[in-house]
Image (cartoon, rainbow, N blue to C red):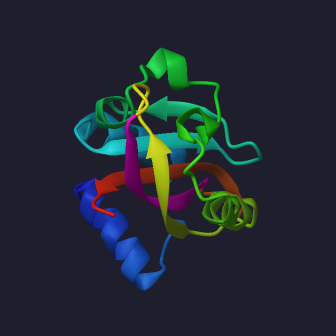
Amino acid sequence: MNISLYLYIQVNFETSLAGDLSYEDACELMQRNQHLSLAITECEMPFLIRKVTHGWTEMCGYSQEAAVGRSFRLIQGAQTDSVQAEYLCQQAAQGLTAEAYIQNYHQSGRVFCNHIRIIPLRSASSEKATHFLGYFEEVDG
């Protein structure tokens, strides 16, 4: 695949064409784009984390080992907007793309504004999501 992950995500959110990226493709792209803050989750609640990039570990302060098998409650806290978090979960439960701005917490306790975008990953043989790819970006806010 010769498309950069960042451009893929931007195109998918601008044109709503998500769904043509497989789990295997996402893993390969994550490996080549460790500097970006990315995570792959299971496709069902509570959307447990399966993989994260070095960029995600730097942004959130948790190692891959500490994150895998946990939900994103790991980076939530008192200032996290539960309505926005629930919106992301509802969209994901329907196999849809979504994005939101949420206050999250670094392992040190530092609060940061996180622009989160999620994209369903699908197998070639099914319309149903097999996993989700999350793209996380710390923004002013």
**At 26% from the left edge and 35% from the top edge, which residue is drawn?**
34
- The span picked out in magenta is 110-123
Q: Main secondary structure of the magenta part?
A: strand
Name the image quarter holding residue 50.
top right
* Residue 125 visible from this viewpoint: yes
Q: Is residue 80 left or right of residue 64?
A: right
**At 77% from the left edge and 46% from the top edge, which residue is drawn?**
45
| Residue located farthest toward the bottom when viewing the structure as drawn | 15
Decide whether residue 119 is among the magenta residues: yes
Name above or below for residue 84 compared with residue 103: below
**At 25% from the left edge and 38% from the top edge, which residue is drawn?**
32
Decide whether residue 128 is among the magenta residues: no
Where residue 140 appears, x then y in whole percent?
27, 61
Q: Nearer the viewer, residue 138 or 44?
A: 138
Name above or below for residue 28 compared with residue 138: above
Name above or below for residue 30 compared with residue 89: above
The tally of labels here is 0
Where residue 77 appears, x then y in whole percent?
58, 41
**At 45% from the left edge and 21% from the top edge, which residue is drawn?**
64
Name the image quarter holding residue 120.
bottom right
* Residue 21 visible from this viewpoint: no
| Residue located farthest toward the front when viewing the structure as drawn | 78
- Please state, as top left, top right, bottom left or bottom right, where the C terminus lies in the image: bottom left
Q: Nearer the viewer, residue 15 or 20?
A: 15
Where residue 130 appears, x then y in whole percent?
66, 49
